Amino acid sequence: MDSPVPAPSPTRERLWRIIFLSDTPIGRTFDVVLLWLIGLSVLTIILESVDEIRLPHESLIYALEWVFTVLFSLEYLARLWVVRRRWRYALSFFGVIDLISILPAYVELLLPGTHYLMALRVLRLMRMFRVLKMAEYMGEANILLAALRASRRKITLFLTTVVSLVLVEGTVVYVLEHDANPDFANIPQAVYWAIVTITTVGYGDVAPVTVPGKMMASIIMLTGFAIIAVPTGIVTSELGRAIGDQKRPRRRCDECGWEDHDPQARFCQHCGTRLG
Amino acid sequence: MDSPVPAPSPTRERLWRIIFLSDTPIGRTFDVVLLWLIGLSVLTIILESVDEIRLPHESLIYALEWVFTVLFSLEYLARLWVVRRRWRYALSFFGVIDLISILPAYVELLLPGTHYLMALRVLRLMRMFRVLKMAEYMGEANILLAALRASRRKITLFLTTVVSLVLVEGTVVYVLEHDANPDFANIPQAVYWAIVTITTVGYGDVAPVTVPGKMMASIIMLTGFAIIAVPTGIVTSELGRAIGDQKRPRRRCDECGWEDHDPQARFCQHCGTRLG
Amino acid sequence: MDSPVPAPSPTRERLWRIIFLSDTPIGRTFDVVLLWLIGLSVLTIILESVDEIRLPHESLIYALEWVFTVLFSLEYLARLWVVRRRWRYALSFFGVIDLISILPAYVELLLPGTHYLMALRVLRLMRMFRVLKMAEYMGEANILLAALRASRRKITLFLTTVVSLVLVEGTVVYVLEHDANPDFANIPQAVYWAIVTITTVGYGDVAPVTVPGKMMASIIMLTGFAIIAVPTGIVTSELGRAIGDQKRPRRRCDECGWEDHDPQARFCQHCGTRLG
Amino acid sequence: MDSPVPAPSPTRERLWRIIFLSDTPIGRTFDVVLLWLIGLSVLTIILESVDEIRLPHESLIYALEWVFTVLFSLEYLARLWVVRRRWRYALSFFGVIDLISILPAYVELLLPGTHYLMALRVLRLMRMFRVLKMAEYMGEANILLAALRASRRKITLFLTTVVSLVLVEGTVVYVLEHDANPDFANIPQAVYWAIVTITTVGYGDVAPVTVPGKMMASIIMLTGFAIIAVPTGIVTSELGRAIGDQKRPRRRCDECGWEDHDPQARFCQHCGTRLG
């Protein structure tokens, strides 16, 4: 459990339990209310960005923004109040996310014109994962995370190789296309094209026009075929292992050492001895 | 068997057997005729939507539409007649599909101008799966479904993460591109772009134009690489398990009937009897 | 070996051995020459389609075409001459391919203006696989084919589901987009868009413009994510099985039945008995 | 260890150890400095290609280029000096890469106007892998490489099939689209389209416009679905095997040293000794 430690005071510890855990009815209610608040506030932010919706309802949206900001500010202060080591919480991952999701509103009050930063309040969504962390999806998430963690080094190595590859491939196509195609005016642009291509996204906003450029692009696409298989292979292998480990608790016979028994087995498959 | 229970009358039970099962020659004929009717009626709907085909043949298509509507209506009434609990069937998945595939024609008769809803009759295609359900692909479908069902929670968790990710990524690129690019005029539009990108569809109808926007897009694409590997990994692992379970040769104990023994087992795991 | 049976004559049988097998030096030379002829003739067809290359070299290309046509015609006649059952060969897969790769040239002689059919001579490429069939890649190809064959029914079922899905999804987006977007003028066009989307190709030549259309498209893309995982999962599972079966010949102990021994093992891992 | 053999002289051998190995503090410092030089020089090349950055800082970038060129030239000469067989090193993979990363600068001095070749200095990036080769990612890289090497023949076979497929598919769509669509003016262009499609990149710069062309394209995309699964299946299977081999706990016989025993083994497979 990596939740912060409560402050040494009965009131604060009770509040801490409600806010940070979900093992009491009131704690679970708090989580549900918080999830709804996060969802509604993110929806408000999204709708606010649409001119057709904001302009006719400007004052309503303005009011809603401040309601959410005040509620999340209170929640942030409450969290700071109940934990034992405040700085540690304030600098933790979720502490920073909490601050970022309320700060833009106050910043805009002081520095008008920074309105676009408001959109960063959408990071509030990340807080959702704190609530989910304690919920039923924990086990599944752990398997996925274990698989990703086990593949971490392989994926790092793979991404390093891919980054080098797109740098080299982008430069080669830049040399080939440069004169004929303003889309390949410089290497960063060509590398952007190489990334769009090797990930098979393929917007088509940048595309080769010369014959050598298209030939090179064809080679890149066909080899990219094999490349896209690598991360899938990595994750699948590790995931298969993680799922297998989880699903197959096996029993061992003390007599002959045979290990491959079902959890419900009563006799050894191999020597017939009764299992303990 | 989740087919509805027949009504308690010999005539209706006989008809029920023809319509709902396919264990008699006439039942199989009914299935084949129904599959052809579904196929032809869907083909008519598709061709009707093409102006170049509908305009010269308007009356023929109009006649065909009503032939199919009447036939499917009769079939729907017959199904209602032969089952024991009518409301239960009417509200079941296939009952609703059956109704949706005939209703638009009658609705248009009463409310002219709703012609586009006619296209929804294409949902008749879903009925095809009812017929296939009893056919030879049952076993294969079960393996695929078992694998998907086993991965249900992991895929839910994964989709939740992806939805949060595209909301956050879309907002960040919205903040970066907003001023320079009318394609990113609001967050929903930016989220649409993020979905198009992370799924590697990449239409190119919305694409970043600023340097920071393209850099962010590149990061999103490269990390999307690892993300696309996750559902594949999940389905592959579960599918491998489902296929493995099906194909693994197992030995059965004649004494107690326990079936789950290794091929090398010599004693029953459950009762300790020596295997033959 | 599914090569045709030779005709009962020493000369023809000798020629048959050269043409259909590759177990003699001259048979292998024949294969290599044939591979080169196929490659060069396909290259000629491809270059011929480029106006900038054909126009200045028209007579050279015309001559080359006839050289290849005559050589492949002679080869086709020789194959017909040496096999025992001529019609059977002529109607076999490779017999038909052989005919298609020479026919267009003669057809054009009789019916000028069918020049574009000439491009179909590119099907000659398929003949390459006949030569490769006898070569070293046989073993690898067998594993891939075994995996694909084992997944045949699952892939058929999957493709049926995907075809139904794109029909339904295309129709729904057609209903939503129809009035606002000429790209979705009819259902076939909308289904084409759905196929382009669900396979993540995403040309962008057809794309939704209305808000409900884009929302529906987003849902289709996100669920397509899970769908693309299915064929990969199927092929991977079967391939893993096929490779595993090939690589793990195991020995069984006659005494205790333990099966999991290396091929080089000399004693049973479990009971210590010397293996036979 | 495939590093070159040092020359038989104490000074040169000491220098060799610093340059080619990283088992001493000074050797590791050399590696880190080299990695930074490579990174900075590649960054310079990339920024130099951007007109907005090069034009105002032309002399600074020019100076930086020569600093890097001189440093890498010294390093190249040092490598040549310390190895025993110079030609062998000069012609090895990394020897050639080393030369290519310094040559363009000198070539431009002699032949002005070849400036675009300068971009090829980006191949210096490949040298990075030499340094990484000795570092901690070695183990992970070996697993990935083992998996790729084991799938080499299968991937070759697969790429051959895909190349034949795109040639045939491109030609068929060329025949269908040729008259109506200038994008399919010749077969190479159509093959380029087929590659863009089958790899699911889908730029949309070339797309079919006729009804038969779109139908053919739809079939190609749907079958491409199954095709993209094959390399993933290959890599995943081999990777699963490679990771499994690495992680499988094995027991070793103290008597004869044979290592490949199951965890439940009781006797040595090779010499029959009872395992401890």
Image (cartoon, coloured by chain):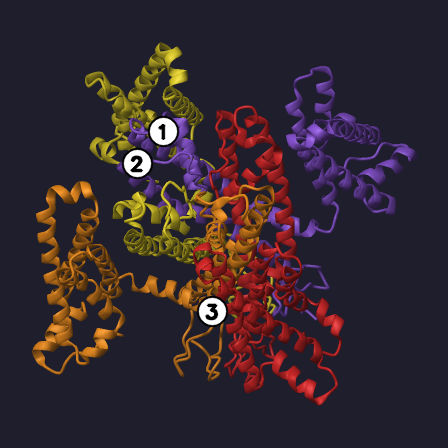
Chain colours: A yellow, B purple, C red, D orange
Judging depth in this view, the residue of C89 and D273 nearest the camera is: C89
Q: What residue is shown at x 27% (from left), y 38% (from top)?
A: B211
Check the image and name the residue furthest to the bottom: C10
Residue under the point 68% across and 37% down: B126
Report if residue D265 is visible in the image.
Answer: yes
Say if mark 2 contacts mark 3, CB within 8 Å. no
**Three-letter code, disc 2:** Gly
Q: Are marks 3 and 1 in contact (CB under 8 Å)?
A: no
Q: In the shown orientation, is residue C22 left or right of residue A52? A: right
Q: Residues within 10 Å of mark 2 (few under 14, many from 20)?
A: some
- How far across and how far down the image is residue D144, in percent? 38, 62
Q: Seen in the image, is C7 located left or right of residue A237?
A: right
Rendered-image quadrant of the C terminus of chain C? bottom right
Residue occupied by mark 3: D153
Q: Quadrant of residue C72?
A: bottom right
Q: Amino acid at mark 3?
A: Arg
Label 1, label 2: how many angstroms apart (C-alpha)? Answer: 10 Å
Residue B207 found in image quarter: top left
Of labels 3 and 1, the one closer to you: 1
Judging from the image, mark 3 belongs to the subunit labelled D
Which one is nearer the viewer's eye here, A216 or D9?
Answer: A216
Q: CA distance from mark 3 to mark 1?
A: 46 Å
**D153 on left or right of B113:** left
Which amino acid does the dot numbered 1 rest on?
A: Phe
Which residue is rendered at x = 75% and y = 29% of the image?
B65
In this figure, which residue is indicated by the disc labeled 2? B213
What secondary structure is found at the residue carrying circle 1? helix
Q: Looking at the rendered structure, which numbered label has been put on residue B184?
A: 1
What chain letter is assigned to the residue under label 1? B
Which residue reaches farthest right? B10
